Amino acid sequence: MFAVHLLAFYFAKLKEDQIKKVDRFLYHMRLSDDTLLDIMTRFQAEMEKGLGKDTNPTACVKMLPTFVRAIPDGSEKGEFLALDLGGSKFRVLTVQVSEDGKRNVHMESQFYPTPKEIIHGSGSELFDYVADCAADFMKTRNIEHKKLPLGLTFSFPCKQSKLEEGILLSWTKKFKVRGVQDTNVVSSLTKALKRHKDIDVDVLALVNDTVATMMTCAYDDPRCEVGVIIGTGTNACYMEDMSNIDMVEGDEGRMCINTEWGAFGEDGSLEDIRTEFDREIDLGSINPGKQLFEKMISGLYMGELVRLILLKMTKAGLLFRGEKSSALYTKGKIETRHVAAMEKYKEGLQNTREILMELGLEPSEEDCLAVQHVCTIVSFRSANLCAAALAAILTRLQENKKLTRLRTTVGMDGTLYKIHPQYPKRLHKVVRKLVPNCDVRFLLSESGSAKGAAMVTAVAARVQAQRKLIDEVLSLFQLTPEHLVNVKNKMRAEMEYGLKKETQPLATVKMLPTYVCAMPDGTEKGNYLALDLGGTNFRVLLVKIRSGRRSVRMYNKIFAIPLEIMQGMGEELFDHIVHCIADFLDYMGIKGASRLPLGFTFSFPCKQTGLDKGTLVEWTKGFKATDCEGEDVVDMLREAIKRRNEFELDIVAVVNDTVGTMMTCGYEDPDCEIGLIAGTGSNMCYMEEMKNIELVEGNEGKMCINTEWGGFGDNGCLDEIRTQYDTEVDEGSLNPGKQRYEKMTSGMYLGEIVRQILIDLTKHGLLFRGQISERLRTRGIFETKFLSQIESDGLALLQVRRILQQLGLDSTCEDSIVVKEVCGAVSRRAAQLCGAGLAAIVEKRREDRNLEHLKITVGVDGTLYKLHPHFSRILRETVKELAPQCDVTFMLSEDGSGKGAALITAVAKRLHLKKDN
Ligand code: BG6
Ligand code: BG6
Ligand code: GLC
Ligand code: GLC
């Protein structure tokens, strides 16, 4: 009994002595808690530096955005091909993700060797080899006919600007393949795969092994938001808030960051803890000066670190009685698996003896104890360093979430972590000590990176399918040049119908005579009242025209017309108008003035039999007051004035806004013979030869025709290009079946078309998380001004999002991109259609006048034309393309239609006076 105790005592003493000896020798490798806390703080600063736009270029920890924005949500499905390159083994796999929501994953895999010639050869050889292996794998499994999306786990630092891209920043670990650095790995692989004509795979995602590990673990534990590899190399990724990632646009949600922590220390920041052994390892590596943190930690270097230490201790006579073996001098003779074996709990000492003997050494009991302790110090330091960096990440997560206690899961993988008997326990313990406020669960990724890569690919495949659907919808709005020529020709034909007595009743473009025959000649003068009803604003104006100067002075006031009046009783509408006139006269102090002449801009289709006679054909846009259609609006206004009995007015003219606009512009540019409105509604007027106007007697001179082209297409002639969304907008409007061209081209409806598309996309789960909000159901939310803002150039997505939020639409950045695209497609089509219509009229004018070339000015007004960032340009481009023989100048009407109405009134007064004299 005593002998046993004595032996135990002797052995304990022996061990203690050896431990002390090694501890003394490797003093520098033992890191105190304070040092670890210090390293943790340094790594926190490194992360910050890597994330900042300005500081990133000089940061050694690159903090690479991965474009993985979410962990799996269980809805992933499909069959995928996965390649897993860069760890200790190269694998090709198929991953089948269940479709029944049970989180079932079935994998089949095969390892392929990565011979030295390949990992130290040329890029094309590497990718050809990888593609060959993939093809071989598919053929041996008889799945070469399947079109499979491929996820590539590529465990090297890559810069990504999207998921399916990876620019290799540098090789690390054992790889050093020529001509790959700074190139896109995905396109190289794609090219190599394309050579195999018999297989059809599409590389949808490139992921780092850390990311894949996080995703693998997150599939089973949704709390997983960190992935750590401690294998051949070491690295970690985690989910960072987008608002902290300067390098990627957008603030919404999170994105996984591949830290590439292996590079920590490259700027010298770890020199105080690096030892002579670390320096020696680095110098002998294929990438000296690089991956300094990795070289103190990971499996590729650990055995070698132990060897260098043993060699030095032996040389110092501290081991093996100073007797070296040639194996001890040979690089790579001690591997990480040896270190792991030597540290095994029970058989460790025996393993140590055997391993040392295999190295040609003759170890004593003391030697074995000492060597075992060397291994412990080296592997413990590795775990400590990993723990410090991981603790920094966890702290960051906790701070991002502003939590006093963080509960989270870390996905783990890598041979060192998996095969080393003590490593996981030590790592966990130190992490918990360094971040006492985190409840960390460490989850080992049992199935490797491929599963996670498949998850990422599944999400990418879903996004791709969604993109396809979105593109399909948007393509409905793309018009070919043939479409546009067709529209132009049909518009032209409808105009001709409208001018002919016989066909006019059935024509959709009504071509209404306006009885405006003369342009102002500059001699007009006097004070005129004008009303301007039917656009965005209702105005009353006083226009003072001074003769000879071609300049006017205007005073105006904007009045609101409540919806219940716009769509109420006709009499009330006119009473309201007169009430506003009264208010304006009071405001101007001219109520007593005798019978001021008045021009009435009334922006609706009117059948006129004289300048001051206009029967409303039908309401358009947002008006629907009763008992007006078929009535003379001038009479209605006169009666309302009479009813009020406060003042008298001389109503001289009723003028469409297009005509008012043409006049406003014509006052300055006599070439202006066309008036165009692209606003709430859409319409155009132009000067026509009297001889072509069959509805009005006389063949001399010209008269302005209000085309009312908004009704174009009401006979179905545009059905080929109308979409389901146009139909929906039409059906929900005040005048179903009417004004179909207007409904595709004007401000009042474009937003509605957009809204219908958004509803449809949302229904298909492609927007707003599939939730159709009350706001989205609300008619009219997308006013022209919002469309214009959303489409503004250079507007950051964030701003688009803000506009959408203002509209009550809670959108993500991805949503905002889609919304902007939808707006763009809809407004572009509008501008093109409007351009095709305008091309029809300028061509007609050119042909009517038998001219080779026509120079003509178009006076334009309307909120869409004025506010939208692209509408006017696309309109002009289209006209140019469709009417190349016409030189069309667009002149923006600065003063609105009211001025034109006053001018028409003034001209009428002048002509009237002439007649009277
Ligand atoms: C594995 C992955 O599970 O972990 C690899 O599938 C990855 O691709 C690896 O690189 C990391 O470990 P090691 O030890 O093989 O480098
Ligand atoms: C304005 C006119 O300038 O243009 C309006 O004065 C007209 O009366 C308008 O209807 C067209 O634009 P919107 O966008 O207001 O309908
Ligand atoms: C190296 C690579 C890194 C990888 C890690 C683990 O550090 O640079 O991308 O994640 O090894 O395999
Ligand atoms: C509607 C009206 C038309 C007007 C146009 C622009 O199309 O019917 O008269 O010119 O809107 O305001």
Image (cartoon, rainbow, N blue to C red):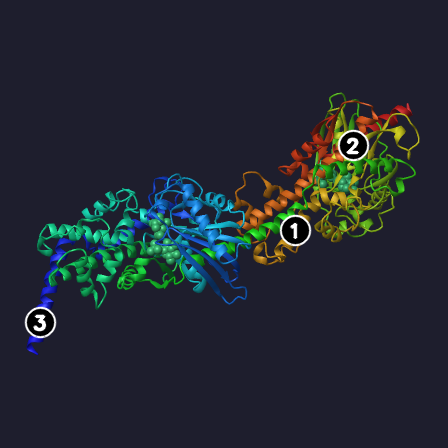
**What amino acid type is highlighted by mark number 3?**
Leu
**What amino acid type is highlighted by mark number 2?**
Ile
The residue wearing badge 3 is 7
| Mark 2 vs mark 3, CA separation in Å | 112 Å
The residue wearing badge 1 is 757
Residue 560, percent from left and from top: 71, 46
Residue 78, percent from left and from top: 53, 59
Q: Nearer the viewer, residue 861 or 792?
A: 792
Residue farthest toward the top in the current orientation of the protein: 548
**What amino acid type is highlighted by mark number 1?**
Ile
Disc number lying in front (3 or 1): 3
Disc number lying in front (2 or 3): 3
Element assignment for label 2: helix
Say whether residue 70 is left or right of residue 837.
Answer: left
Which of the two discs, 2 and 3, labels the residue nearer the N terminus?
3
**Residue 649 seen:** no
Residue 423, percent from left and from top: 27, 61
Residue farthest toward the front in the current orientation of the protein: 140
The residue wearing badge 2 is 841
Say whether residue 294 is left or right of residue 848.
Answer: left
Residue 360, percent from left and from top: 16, 55
Task: Using the rendered view, name the quadrant where residue 883 is placed.
Answer: top right
Residues at discs 3 and 1 in contact (Cβ within 8 Å): no
Q: Nearer the viewer, residue 304 or 116?
A: 116
- State which quarter of the image contains the N terminus: bottom left
Task: Using the rendered view, name the quadrant where residue 354 is placed.
Answer: bottom left
Which residue corresponds to the image point at 8% horizontal and 71% vertical from the top-left? 7
Quarter of the displayed picture in which ligand 1 can be seen: bottom left
- State which quarter of the image contains the C terminus: top right
